[in-house]
Image: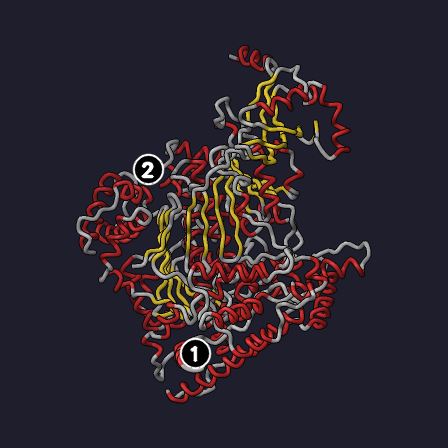
Amino acid sequence: MAEPKNKYDRQLRIWGEQGQAALEKASICLLNCGPTGSETLKNLVLGGVGSITVIDGSKVEQGDLGNNFMVDVSCVGQSKAKCVCTFLQELNDAVKAKFIEEYPKALIDSNPSFFSQFTLVVATQLAEDSMVKLDKICREAKVLLIFARSYGLTGFVRISVKEHAVIESKPDHFLEDLRLNNPWPELERFAESIDLNVSDPVAHKHTPYVVILVKMAEEWAKAHGGALPSTRDEKKEFKELLKAGMVAMDEDNYTEATEASFKVFAPRGISTDLQKIIHDGCSEVESNSSDFWVMVAALKEFIANEGGGEVPLEGSIPDMTSSTELYVNLQKIYQEKAEVDFLAIQQRVKNILKRIGRDPDSISKAMIKSFCKNARKLKVCRYRLLEDEFNNPAVSELQKYLTDEEYGVAMGFYILLRAVDRFAANYNSFPGQFEGEMDEDISRLKTTVVGLLTDLGCNGATVTEDLISEMCRFGASELHAVAAFIGGIASQEVIKLITKQFVPMVGTFIFNGIDQRSQLLAL
Amino acid sequence: MADSTVQQSRSRDLDKLLLRPGNLVAPTFEPGVQLRDDLQEYARILVIGAGGLGCELLKDLALSGFKNLEVIDMDRIEVTNLNRQFLFRLEDVGKPKAEVAAKRVMERVSGVNIVPHFCRIEDKDIDFYKDFSIIALGLDSVEARSYINAVACGFLEYDSDDNPIEETVKPMVDGGTEGFKGHARVIMPGSTPCFECTIWLFPPQVKFPLCTLAETPRTAAHCIEYAHLIKWDEVHSGKTFDPDDPEHMKWVYTEAVKRAELFGIQGVTYSLTQGVVKNIIPAIASTNAIISAACTLETLKLASGCSKTLGNYLTYNGVEGLHIKVTEFVRDKDCLVCGPGVLIELDTSVTLQRFIDMLEEHPKLLLSKASVRHQATNLYMQSPPVLEEMTRSNLSLPLFELMGKVPKDIVHVTGTANKDDKKTSCLRKLRLVFKGVDAVTDMDMAVGA
């Protein structure tokens, strides 16, 4: 209840103390502090990251006053990095803020080892060649990297990290782990101890739906050679049986049981997403495997052995109509089973660690517990190196996107955002950057686009004239509202990467500021 | 002269969009210096709310070519605002949000003028809202959105063909966030759905049944709500619970802990107690930034025509990957708030009784047993009996007189509609025009011409 914690109350409710601690440990490096970079950092400084280092070699100009909130009129002529850093520091004195007056491109070329000191690098408004170089540097040094760029009414955000594994993915709607289709002996016994036909009407309408469904499913299985309802008619019949069990119209528990009956019909075992993870090459662990994959290896063994095809039980139940006593007892049964499953996984983790020559206690109990609780929700995100994406494009995907009604504009912008860098390398300015050369620039950009598409292996594909003209109209402008949007998206993804909670986006996010139909391209 | 060069270069990036012709723009777009200057001089934007979204909106608008802004908010700054409401500092806690926000943005962005209003939105005259080109909403409550929506739609007038009259359209841009999710939408009353047309997008908050709280608590939240809604009144007879009083909150927390222990329930914490009692919605800077930026961009497009407009509802979800979706919702043609209402022309001599009879025969309405309301007055109520008796004497009076002899106005009627042999109770908006009364206005216009 102390003041400094109070400040973060509204976000602690999202990512908790652990997420906050991860943020407070993180050191973030920003390359280029125009509005896109400044807005990204603003959101992170407010959230309380440990430290920021702002890198920019330019001086504040009049034009910057019109699009960047982190400079004011007194800053004109001074180091932009210094001014932005000062204003960012004002937002939160718990953050250590530093700046370096240097051009990112020069730093990338001359001092690649510089970046290894950071948790994460936010690289904004970089040209393609610098992005490719920085990408390799950060990949090598195992530093998280995110690119962000605003360009007129478009822009992009792209994460680059070899692998990001998430235990606490916290999905919005996820089926509770109740095992109504596969109850374990203790749950069966508990259900047996309760009489569904109890004569007391108060007791009847306070029997939790979990108990009702376990008992009804068992009864059904007995009459159907061990099988649960699977056809449409069988499911309907099962629901009729439930209805027949009601003694009064106002029995919420029976309504809940009917609504939850699909949980009885659901197939047993694990999801295809989880199948993929336990069969991933990384689950064959070695001495240098990450803790995550060690736990996945333990999970794989568990599923094949004591789990009987299921993951460790999550151990929590949703609220449901029930007497307090039955609910609390039911809660205990789920918790106890979860604890037993956790102990089994823990033992397997220890054995695996010993086998690969590591300290058997090197993965904390809390970590294993969290892993067990979230076993059904694990996520693994992988990102190609930019160089790989640029040199070995997925041609079929590119072509599919280009001609798709929903994705066409976003794909067009993806091509154009790359084309303008190629244009700049050839003509020393971006198309439409200066007045008076619009018509020439439009035709030059068109040629550049055709060349790029050919290089990508998409011969014959085109980007619409309208979009090419718009790109020239944008003239490399960095509009504040667009920068705030791109910066907002970038900071959101940074938070997910650092807290290791929720699922970061995979692919390239292309902002479409024309009609707001932005897209995520998997390339 | 020097001043104008400074201004030009300050508008370096925005000029590309406002001074150059484009292909994917609104039909009304007229690029040029004049457009830029008009935005600065004539466009007036009202920001409702100076919280997480409001702070961002003010900053974004001030850096998007607008110079005349106003902001209205009734709240004072709290410590828990500081993780996202970036215009506020620890030393500002307790000060009015609108005033501090306006001051901070004006200090940073020279040339912008922001007028703060530290009051409730209901405190302002309806005419206050009429003066703005666009209203940007940064709110967290359904009620406040409904109110502003009704005010803005109230300015809307329709011509005799039921088409909205352009000069009376007050555009709104609305944002909302919760955790990693949010929405941004554009409301053009009369052409895109208003807030009430799609009210179902905001499902009502789930409340626990009192018998669960009193008899069969199962979760920590049940124990907290028991202490908050039942025990408090039992113990503190007559004293109202104040969620902002830490002593009150601590009392609820302690009672909730006791109850949880009694029933063997786990999980009551002080933080959860606050969350449940105050219905706290988690909020972070990044989501607010994304949604406000989308709203600002749409505001700029509406005011300048420099690109296409969002049609009409954007949702952002960053929980699992990144999902941005644009949905084109459609208007509810019968919407009581933004719809035209059924046009009925009446002689000034028509009595209320005759009017009610007419509703039954009207082909678009077929409304029987109608009750009639004009503004806040019940002209005739079918029930309850007390009200029926009180309003019965109106039936024999001319409607024109009952409505204060205005040439035209809106009335709301409720009754039973007969459609396809089915009887349903319904509420209808009617536009009444009395024949021959607006002759005075016509004459004025003739003289003016």
Q: In the displayed structure, would residue B396 be above or below residue B340?
A: above
Does residue B262 sit above or below B7 in this rendering?
below
| Residue found at x 52% / y 57% | B179
Query: Mark 2 is on which residue type?
Result: Gly
Q: Residues within 10 Å of mark 1 (few under 14, many from 20)?
A: few
Residue at 46% x, 84% y: name it. A362
> Residue A240, relative to residue A224: is it above or below?
above
B212 horizontally vs B300: left or right: right
Dot 1 corresponds to which residue? Answer: A308
Residue A288 lies, in percent from the top left, at 36, 82
Helix, strand or loop under label 1:
loop
Q: Can you give x and y, in whole percent of width and height, for residue A181 in the image?
A: 48, 70
Question: Badge 2 is on which residue?
Answer: B22
Foreground pick, A430 / A140: A140
Badge number at residue A414: none
Colour convention: secondary structure
Label 2 secondary element? loop
**Depicted B399 relative to depicted B306: above or below:** above
Q: Chain of mark 1?
A: A
Q: Position of residue A372 (x, y in %)?
A: 48, 75
Q: Nearer the viewer, residue B339 or A419?
A: B339
Could you tell me which quadrant the N terminus of chain B lies in? top left
Number of numbered labels in the structure image = 2
| Amino acid at the residue labelled 1 | Gly
Q: For this view, does A156 lie left or right of residue A199?
A: left
Q: Chain of mark 2?
A: B
Picture quarter containing residue A54? bottom left
Res B381 visible? yes
Let me know if residue B113 appears in the view: no
Q: Is residue A117 left or right of residue A43?
A: left
